């Protein structure tokens, strides 16, 4: 089916107590694997792109991969732009076929962040796509943006209410104690804050920094309004490790198709595991009955 807008999908997820898994695609194989995993579980999925991945491949190539696999599948698929500061790139994504865009102006003071995010809201409205924006500073490294632990600022629920009221977001990214990349110690996720932000905003929350969180943490965050869970680092590791493992297990096998097939299968298993964990299994029909 054609790509879907992220807004109704995340509303459906929040209203029904599950989260849609969002994976940062690397190439055509990982894109195909995430949609195949979703299809096997009859679940929706979000294929998201880091800005540097778009710079590496191009808008045209990425949109052609995602459209190809989504058009051939029977489940709802979103093409979303992850953390981006560049308004020209954001507008290019909306124009070229992304069905959701993200502005990350979270390093700016509140008023400037809101101002820039409002400009992106106008872009999202112009092209009829979903939108995510961020308030607070999430720790760790994502797409060459680095936030040290001491610089991380957890999101204030009252500020979140003002921010979300002004923007009508599909997804609200906020700092609740999670971090991009692998955790060094035990993550200190602030579940009360998630709940308070959700009460104040009534906006589906995007839980960033999904790699390394426990099943219990996912379940608690989702029960409190996290409707989109982002996974990137875990995918990067499985992508590279499965290649290395194959060459160790089968030294001298230089058939590329067997190597990329091993990577594809490992990534697909990873995606399926997360989709199921987030409660996405068998959610596609109910969403499509309302929005198909
Ligand atoms: P991880 O890299 O920790 O999985 O976080 C992904 C993310 O939040 C992308 O925006």
Image (spheres, rainbow, N blue to C red):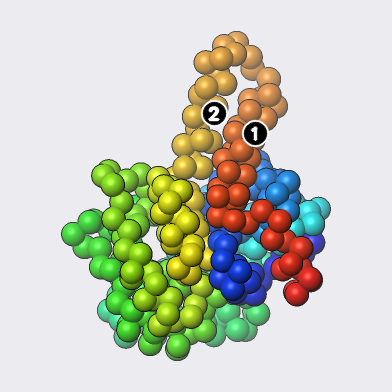
How packed mark 1 is, by other alpha carbons closer than 10 Å (few <14, some 14-19, many 20 or more), is some
Q: Secondary structure at mark 2?
A: helix
- Residue at image position (31%, 51%) is 187
Q: Are marks 2 and 1 in contact (CB under 8 Å)?
A: yes
Q: Is residue 127 above or below residue 3?
A: below
Left-right relation of 48 to 109: right
Does label 2 or label 1 sit earlier along the sequence? 2
- Residue at image position (45%, 68%) is 224
How packed mark 2 is, by other alpha carbons closer than 10 Å (few <14, some 14-19, many 20 or more), is many
In which quadrant of the rendered view does residue 258 lie? Answer: top right
Quarter of the image with the C terminus in it = bottom right
Distance of label 2 from label 1 (alpha carbons): 9 Å
Q: Is residue 106 above or below residue 201?
A: above
Where does label 1 land, which residue?
A: 265
Left-right relation of 174 to 101: left
Where does label 2 land, which residue?
A: 242
């Amino acid at each position: 089916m054609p790509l879907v807008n992220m807004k109704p999908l995340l509303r459906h997820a929040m209203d029904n107590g599950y989260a849609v898994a969002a994976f940062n695609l690397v190439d055509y194989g990982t894109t195909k694997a995430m949609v195949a995993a979703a299809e096997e579980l009859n679940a929706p999925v979000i294929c998201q792109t880091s800005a540097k991945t778009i710079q590496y491949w191009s808008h045209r190539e990425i949109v052609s991969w995602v459209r190809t696999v989504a058009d051939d599948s029977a489940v709802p698929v979103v093409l979303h732009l992850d953390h981006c500061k560049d308004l020209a790139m954001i507008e290019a994504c909306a124009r070229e076929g992304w069905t959701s865009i993200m502005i990350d102006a979270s390093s700016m003071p509140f008023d400037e962040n809101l101002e820039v995010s409002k400009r992106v809201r106008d872009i999202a409205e112009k092209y009829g796509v979903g939108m995510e924006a961020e308030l607070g500073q999430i720790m760790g490294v994502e797409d060459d943006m680095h936030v040290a632990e001491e610089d991380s600022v957890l999101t204030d629920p009252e500020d979140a209410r003002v921010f979300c009221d002004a923007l009508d977001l599909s997804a609200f990214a906020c700092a609740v104690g999670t971090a991009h990349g692998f955790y060094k110690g035990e993550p200190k996720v602030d579940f009360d804050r998630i709940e308070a932000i959700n009460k104040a905003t009534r906006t589906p929350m995007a839980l960033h920094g999904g790699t390394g969180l426990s099943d219990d943490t996912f379940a608690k965050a989702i029960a409190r309004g996290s409707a989109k869970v982002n996974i990137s680092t875990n995918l990067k590791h499985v992508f590279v490790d499965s290649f290395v493992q194959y060459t160790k297990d089968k030294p001298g096998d230089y058939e590329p198709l067997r190597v990329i097939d091993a990577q594809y299968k490992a990534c697909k298993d990873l995606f399926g595991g997360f989709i199921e964990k987030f409660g996405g299994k068998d959610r596609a029909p109910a969403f499509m009955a309302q929005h198909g």
